[in-house]
Image: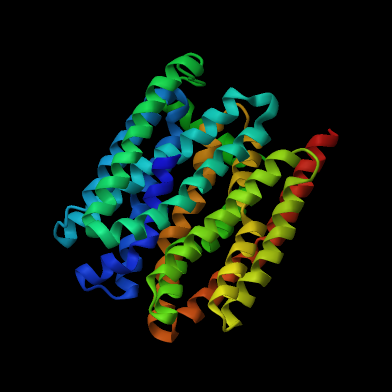
Amino acid sequence: MLCVSFSMSVIGQMRDKIEDAYGLTATQGGLLLSVQSIGGFAVTVIAMVFIDAFNKRKLIVAAGVLTSLLIMAIGIGQPLFPLFVVYVMLGFFAGIIKTLVNAVMYDTVLENAETHMTLLHLMFSLASVIGPLAAYALYISTGISGVFFILGGVSMACALYAGFAFRKSLPGKMRQSSANVRLRFSELKNAAKKPGMAAIATVSLLVSMWQVAAIYTTSSYLSQLRGNDSHGATALSVLFLGMMLARGLFAKAAGRFSQIRVLAVGSAAGAACWLAMLFVPDVTAKIVLIGVSALMCGNNIPITYMIGCKIAPEQTATASGIISFGFYLALFVFVPVVSALGDAMGMQAGLIFAALPLVALIPFAVRVYRVMRRADSA
């Protein structure tokens, strides 16, 4: 999960520097980020159809190693087209990790899945808190190449360690289904038709719209506001700190509160804090409100994965792939839209637009709540 964290948080922190190096506008930089979703779309299709039939442990480790190499490759300074290819491949291999770690965690600790899946996402946030600050410090002393070489190396060490750890702690090959293609497509169709799956996938899309906009534009917005890169690095770390605290608190309280109520109420409160952040003049107040907004919305992504796996417990990788599809669709469409609004009307206008999905998801969350309640009563 640290590999995925670095591939998002460090790229988010270094977005301005990459755009400056290649002479890109914010819109063009948004398109560069969005091409990660091409690889992400590919892996979600593979996950939804085939991954439940393969050795999940080996796939996670291999994807972690390749993700780390691709993070390092960003620092090489290659021409623009190869950089686009690197971003596509990064989306593919980071997508494998993102999909599989959720499925594996649910399969491994089924009796206490809520707590452990929340802790898994907490570790993502912890690495993301460190990533932007480390990237800022490394950039001052080593430049953009050093940032990606060093943090890619740290990611590689973690991926290799996971390979040794998995051999001791994870049971068997963790296959759930046969590799028969016709059967796999039939199972995908059945999973997608399960009551509540379409609604939770829509919630995932809307949640992800805000999250990708926040991750990939917060640092640029705060850095440009006063011409101080440290403001952007701090704001992005505070964003992930808010998510980490939210996940830590929810991990302790998992089971006491309705997941969907936490998601709906938190999203509404998070949208209010996000909009307030855009209109207060003080930079410190803005950074605090970014953290509070993240605290309110920080559990949304793990909750969607937990509910997707609950809806289709016999096909957890398929369910995780369906949920991940929303994230990559948001990355493909929403980051360029927010960036284009930023170019045309100012970054503040783009970030106002980013808050709207948090409100729009509430009716779909209510739909999921009703479906889950009927299933529990049955």
Q: Pinpoint residue 356: horizontal percent, then vertical percent.
A: 60, 71
Residue at the image position 20 percent from the left and 68 percent from the top:
22
Q: Residue 170 versus residue 284: which sits nearer the camera? A: 284
Q: In this view, does 147 lie above or below 226?
A: above
Residue most toward the right? Answer: 377
Q: Residue 125 versus residue 93: which sits nearer the camera? A: 125
Q: Pinpoint residue 357: horizontal percent, then vertical percent.
A: 60, 66
Residue 92 can be seen, yes or no: yes
Q: In which quarter of the image is the N terminus?
A: top left
Residue at the image position 24 percent from the left and 52 percent from the top:
146
Q: In which quarter of the image is the C terminus?
A: top right
Q: Is residue 132 left or right of residue 303?
A: left
Based on the displayed image, in which of its 4 quarters is residue 268 positioned? bottom right
Residue 299 can be seen, yes or no: no
Q: Pinpoint residue 32: horizontal percent, then vertical percent.
A: 30, 62
Q: Pinpoint residue 104: horizontal percent, then vertical percent.
A: 52, 28
Q: Is residue 40 above or below residue 282?
A: above
Q: Residue 27 versus residue 280: which sits nearer the camera? A: 280
